[in-house]
Amino acid sequence: MLIPCLACESRFRPDDYFRACTDYNRGLDLVSWICPSCGNHDDLRVLPGELGFGYPCRGRFAVHDRLRVPGLRRQRGELRLDISLDAHSWRIATRVRLPV
Ligand SMILES: [Zn+2]
C-alpha cells in the first residue's frame, strides 16, 4: 500500500515514508515526519495497524485522524521506536535533549 502526505497528497511506499520519520518523542509517543515532496511537517503516532495524526494538546498528543496500515507493528525502546511492516523495519531514534 502507499501512504499519503496529508498536505500535498503525494503517496509514498512505506520504506520512503518511514525513512522520513525522525525524533521519536517517548513522552508524547509520537514521531516527526517531514514530507520528502512538499516539506510539510506532521506529528504522528505509530499504532498497531494504523497511523494516528493529530497535535499536542494539554501535554498529550490528541489523535484526530487515523490511517489504517494493515500489518504495521511497533516496539517501544529506551531511546527509540522500532517500526515493522511485512519484512521491513525502521528504527526511529530519540533526539537526546541535554539539560541546559
Ligand atoms: Zn507532502
Image: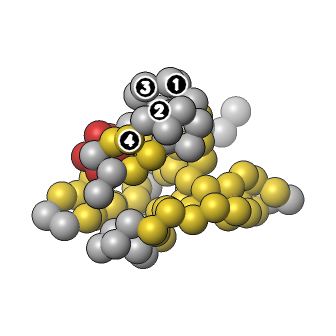
Say which amino acid is labelled 2.
Answer: Cys
Compare residues 51 and 12 and report the one nearer the observer.
12
If you read the primary sequence from the N terminus, does the residue marked by circle 4 or circle 3 appear first? 4
Q: Is residue 44 left or right of residue 89?
A: right
Callout 2 touching callout 3 (CB < 8 Å) = yes
Residue in the picture at 63% in, 61% down: 65
Callout 4 touching callout 3 (CB < 8 Å) = no
Task: Look at mark 4 in the image and give the residue it sits on.
Answer: 11
Say which amino acid is labelled 3.
Answer: Ser
Residue at mark 1: C-beta within 8 A of ligand 1 = yes
Q: Secondary structure at mark 2?
A: loop
Residue at mark 2: C-beta within 8 A of ligand 1 = yes
Callout 2 touching callout 1 (CB < 8 Å) = yes
Task: Look at mark 2 in the image and give the residue it sits on.
Answer: 35
Q: Would you identify the image quadrant in which residue 57 lies?
A: bottom right
Query: Quadrant of the image for the N terminus?
Result: bottom left
2 w.r.t. 21: above or below: below
**Image spot of residue 29 (x, y percent):** 57, 62
* CA distance for labels 2 and 3: 5 Å
Q: Is residue 75 visible?
A: no
Q: Is residue 70 visible?
A: yes
Mark in the foreground, 4 or 3: 4
Compare residues 4 and 54 and report the one nearer the observer.
4
Task: Look at mark 1 in the image and give the residue it sits on.
Answer: 39
Task: Look at mark 3 in the image and give the residue it sits on.
Answer: 37
Residue at mark 4: C-beta within 8 A of ligand 1 = no
* CA distance for labels 2 and 4: 10 Å
* CA distance for labels 4 and 3: 9 Å
Callout 3 touching callout 1 (CB < 8 Å) = yes
